[in-house]
Image (cartoon, rainbow, N blue to C red):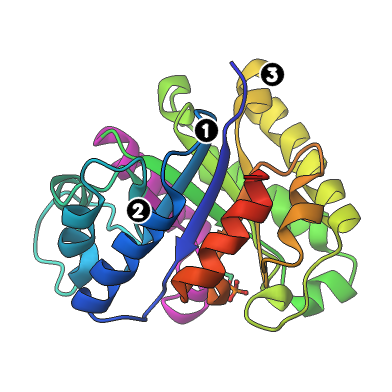
Amino acid sequence: MDRKQLIVANWKMHKTPAKAAEDAEAIATALGRLPDHSCVALAPPFPALVPVRERLNHTQLLLAAQNVHSEAEGAFTGEVSAPMLKACGCSLVIVGHSERRALAKESDAMVQAKIKAAFSHEMGVILCIGESESQRNEGLTFKVLDKQVREAVKGLSVTGVNSLVLAYEPVWAIGTGKTASADQVQEVHAFLRKILAECLEKDLAKQTEILYGGSVKPSNIKDLMSMEDVDGALVGGASLDPKTFVSLIRNGFDL
Ligand SMILES: O=C(CO)COP(=O)(O)O
């Protein structure tokens, strides 16, 4: 089975539900029909999930959430569970974003529990990993990534892992305008695929999509996606304006 190409908009804490729905419709209309192996997903904030879902009906665009709790229900004020997200129409969820690891102190163990919760409700997971600037400067990049991946996929069932997408997001490249070079990204992605082959099965590692995130723009997506092990992108800032995001997708997918 070949890997898909996937471009995901992470809208973070931006847009009201009405604006998110309007922009989702604008993106879907501008893109029209996508080639079979090319997918686009939108990850709006929680209150916008249902309004966005309503505009994405009858389109190929997928709906993603930005976070999930590890339990299905209970006394967890402010949290949202996998069955709730599934009921809102999410087929994917972003887990372990560096902003959540930093701001909400999410550990690798919490990330793993969230992945399990998502898989048990048949949702695909976009697992974010990435080193900080100081870790890179100290030569720790591969060690950090190795630990993040191994701890996150520990004990996952093979069926679950079919729905895993990795997103390499070096923390120093997020929202900074500093993008890792295409060669730097390829080197890391090849390494990540090697780790996956060690933790999972070889064939599954070959099938796992690995996205890059960190200041991806219409001007650099093509170079990044020309790399053998780069299957797409997780986009923050450049996904907020529908026109910019559509041109990024067109450049990335060569449409
Ligand atoms: O964090 C990101 C996507 O999840 C990347 O954000 P930017 O594209 O704004 O650098």
Instruction: Determine the image quadrant of residue 54.
Output: bottom left
Crowding at dot 2, Cα within 10 Å, few <14 / some 14-19 / many 20+, comes out as: many
On the image, the x and y values in percent for residue 81 come to 20, 55
The part of the image, by quadrant, that contains residue 78 is bottom left
Which secondary structure lies at badge 3?
helix
Residue located beneath label 1 in the image: 35
Residue 72 lies, in percent from the top left, at 16, 49
Q: Amino acid at mark 2?
A: Ala
- Coordinates of residue 137 in the picture (x, y in percent): 88, 75
Q: Quadrant of ligand 1?
A: bottom right
Q: CA–CA distance between discs 1 and 2?
A: 20 Å
Q: Is 106 contained in the magenta span?
A: yes
Q: Secondary structure at mark 2?
A: strand
- For the question of whether residue 100 can be seen, the reply is no
Residue 92 position (above or below residue 204): below
Q: Which residue is mark 3?
A: 202
Question: Which residue lies at the image location 48% right of the left edge and 29% below the top edge?
Answer: 161
